[in-house]
Amino acid sequence: MTTPTIAAPTTAVGHPAAWRWRLPYLLLALFIGAILSLVWLVRSNDLEEQRATLINDVLWIEQNLRFQLDKNADLLAELGPDLLGEDGMSYNAAARATRMIQPGNPVRQVIWMVPDGSIGGAMPRLEVMPPPWGEAAAIAELPSGALFRLAAASGRAVFGPVYRAIGNDVRFAVFVPYYRGSEFAGVVIGIHSLRDLIIREVPWWFSERYELSILDAAGDEIVSKSKVDALATEMEYQIPLDPPGRGASLRVRPYRAQVRWVAVLLGGAIALLGAGVVWSVWQLRRHMVRRQEAELALREEYAFRRAMEDSLLTGLRARDMEGRMIYVNPAFCRMVGFGEDELIGHAPPMPYWDPDELARTQALHEYVLARGTTGDGIEIQLKRRNGERLDALIFEAPLIDAQGRQTGWMGSVLDITDQKRAQRLARQQEERLQATSRLITMGEMASTLAHELNQPLTAIASYATGCLNRLDQGAMDPDEMRAVLGKLGKQAQRAGQIIRRVHDFVRRSEPKRERLDLNAIVRESVGLVEPDARKRAVDIEVALTDPLPFTQADPVMVEQVAINLIRNGMDAMKAIPASRRRLRVGTGCTAHEVAIRVADQGSGIPPELARRLFEPFFTTKSEGMGMGLNICRSIAELHHGRLVFEDNPDGGTIFTLWLPLSPK
């Protein structure tokens, strides 16, 4: 089947036509960039103006608060002659002090102190001394003594720190000294409510724009004046509140964004102009698309044909809805050995189908024509023209025409003959490695097994010698002979059982799946390693779940895993005292799996070793090969199971082999 060669239209970079088509897109990109830059600049300027306005308003309110505090300090200073005069408090002083502490005024209390630091009086009268004075009378003993002395020494008003008062109010004191001539005559103290000061001195227009807060030295809000709860912006400005100072600060946040109509109108005009430009370019593009429809259709057909021709390593074939061959590529022809003219138009059965698998191949063919293939593909055996068999992996997908209708099936055929051969070789090598591992295990246990086997053989020899001696003496009756021969037979059975276990474990055989009881595997494995456990002074505790569901597995392979895990557990407890060498072997099950669990009480597995535990040839034993756990995990995965481990709460490690339940 020939494929037309069509040259794709190209335009040289330096050709005037190339710049003619690219220029609108370049101008559009520059226009959009200019719009974004302009919007950013307008937004930046707007934010700068808002911040400048905010700072000016904050400075104004701070100056207003300072002016009011200075005014109050002057009023307190004017009270000094009347409160601290030689004739005591006059009626005029009482009236003026009363006016200062009227509701709505920030001054909540007026206190005057004489030169020795004691309190001369207060309006209203002191029932309980306000903080921070407590109940002491001598100013030298109070925390405010430093402020008293500072006011006396400096001759000017001194502001005290803010403090919390009864009723959740926040207050501070102003110490104003009074001198009679050049002689210090005392201090007039005005207790100010910071909350009333803010409420009175912050105008309505400021509250409409901003949230005003007073923060203490720790940054906690102690006074606030706001008409809304949620802020519309995170812009804020904070300055120290001095007076009263001592760590207090004034924070202002704007919560109402001003509408910048000039920026809105400008942005709208720019957006409208940009939309017009985009619409113009889009109309130009639609015109270009209409003119290039025929060329694009031709390019799609060309790309489709060229892709099939270039797939030289993967065989491609296309069939119609009846299964008749309508296209093959050269790679598929080389794969099956038939030419293109021999395959095009051919209906099933195909000449490359294996005659021995004809019925199965026909069934797969009909299945694919009805449903297609899954993501994993379908494995099938084909036959080349020269008679060689071919293992292939086939993927089928619907063949859709330009109108969206399915006209057939497009298939990709992969030659996996070498891959299947490599898998078979790898499986054989894995079986040899497993058999070698079992032989090594038996070699390590040889001396222990020889000692275990020597015991029944010695007993057999002793019983036989005893019988011969009694026969020579003629003093052995039949009942005694029967009892001795019975004991001799039991010892022979014991020796035979040991030899059978070793033989079953080390013999090489093809893997076979059968319904398997893991309880029986555990009993066989424990019986095989029991001599070695006694030699190592390890106490094996067996806890079997009975009844236990069956699994489908190879008994020799599963027994190999169990023995490896038991011997690894005994190796892990080599360094601990013999009294603590206890290995727990048990079985269990869930709704879908059965398990063999081996728990030791060794030192556990460090995290840095746990990551490499199943790597080939990785071992912590000086004489180990590093293949035991790797083989165990391979056996588990071969049976669609898993081998996992976890820390033992009693110390050591728990290894668990999970196998799926046998289908009923």
Image (spheres, helix red, strand yellow):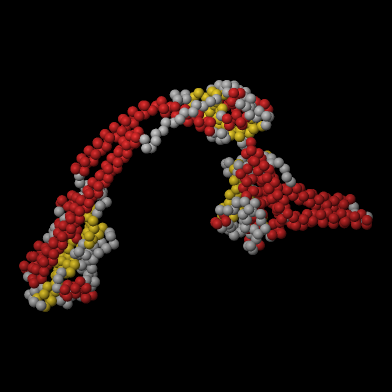
Residues 271 and 591: in front is 271
Write the residue at 57% across / 41% down: 591
Q: Position of residue 475 (x, y in %)?
A: 92, 56
Q: Quadrant of the N terminus?
A: top right
Task: Give the residue at the far front of this rendering.
Answer: 15
Q: Position of residue 463 (x, y in %)?
A: 85, 55
Number of on-image labels: 0
Q: Quadrant of the C terminus?
A: top right
505 with respect to 253 (left or right) = right
- Observer able to see residue 619: yes
Residues 170 and 573: in front is 573
Write the residue at 53% across / 31% down: 309
Residue 579 lies in quadrant: bottom right
Write the residue at 32% across / 39% down: 26
Residue 419 sits above or below residue 372 on the image: below
379 with respect to 249 (left or right) = right
Residues 603 and 476: in front is 603
Residue 484 sits above or below residue 269 on the image: below
Write the residue at 67% across / 31% down: 388
72 with respect to 11 (left or right) = left
Q: Position of residue 209 (x, y in %)?
A: 19, 50
Q: Position of residue 359 (x, y in %)?
A: 64, 25
- Observer able to see residue 226: no
411 with respect to 482 (left or right) = left
Residues 15 and 74: in front is 15
